[in-house]
Image (tube, grey):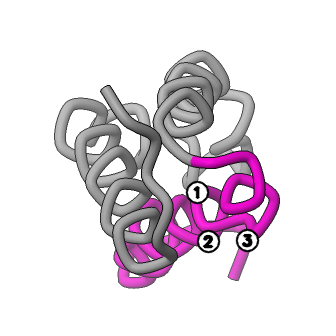
Amino acid sequence: MALIETEEAARRLARAIASDISLYNEEKIVTGLSNDDLFGTLSEEIEEGRALFKSRVAPSLFDKNFYDRAIIDILIRSKGHLKSKMW
């Protein structure tokens, strides 16, 4: 499979991976946000997603942090309505 070479495709992949993490780990996300330990609670899932993203995009695109931004947008911003020590 060819590496993703465009920023738009890399963003879409990052968001798709983050969405899958969100979809399959809703309970862990709520717990992590409630306990102010989201990244510790989901460390395995986040790192597995990062490895997948890195394996599918050109190195120059990986360095642009599209994956980290997608994690913030999808796992944190979308859960802003939840009670958390973080906010």
Task: Residue 67: give its label.
Answer: 1
Determine contact: label 2, label 1, CB under 8 Å: yes
What residue sits 49% from the left and 61% below the top?
5
Q: Nearer the viewer, residue 44 or 16?
A: 16
How far is mark 1 from mark 3, CA to CA?
A: 21 Å
Residue 70 within the magenta-colored segment of the rendering = yes
Given this view, does label 1 or label 3 mark the residue nearer the observer? 1
Q: What's the magenta bit mostly, secondary-structure-wise?
A: helix
For the residue marked with disc 3, what is the amino acid? Met
How far is mark 3 from mark 2, CA to CA?
A: 17 Å
The location of residue 53, given as percent across then percent down, is 51, 39
Given this view, does label 3 or label 2 mark the residue nearer the observer? 2
**Left or right relative to 20: residue 49:** right
How far is mark 2 from mark 1, CA to CA?
A: 5 Å
Of the image marks 3 and 2, the number of the one nearer the N terminus: 2
Q: Residues within 10 Å of mark 1 (few under 14, many from 20)?
A: many
For the residue marked with disc 2, what is the amino acid? Arg
The residue that mark 3 highlights is 86
What residue sits 54% from the left and 46% below the top?
57
Residue 86 within the magenta-colored segment of the rendering = yes
Q: Tell me the quadrant of the picture where the C terminus can be found.
A: bottom right
Q: Nearer the viewer, residue 59 or 77?
A: 59
The residue that mark 2 highlights is 69
Residues rendered magenta in the picture? 58-87
Determine contact: label 1, label 3, CB under 8 Å: no
Q: Quadrant of residue 23?
A: top left
The location of residue 58, given as percent across then percent down, is 62, 48
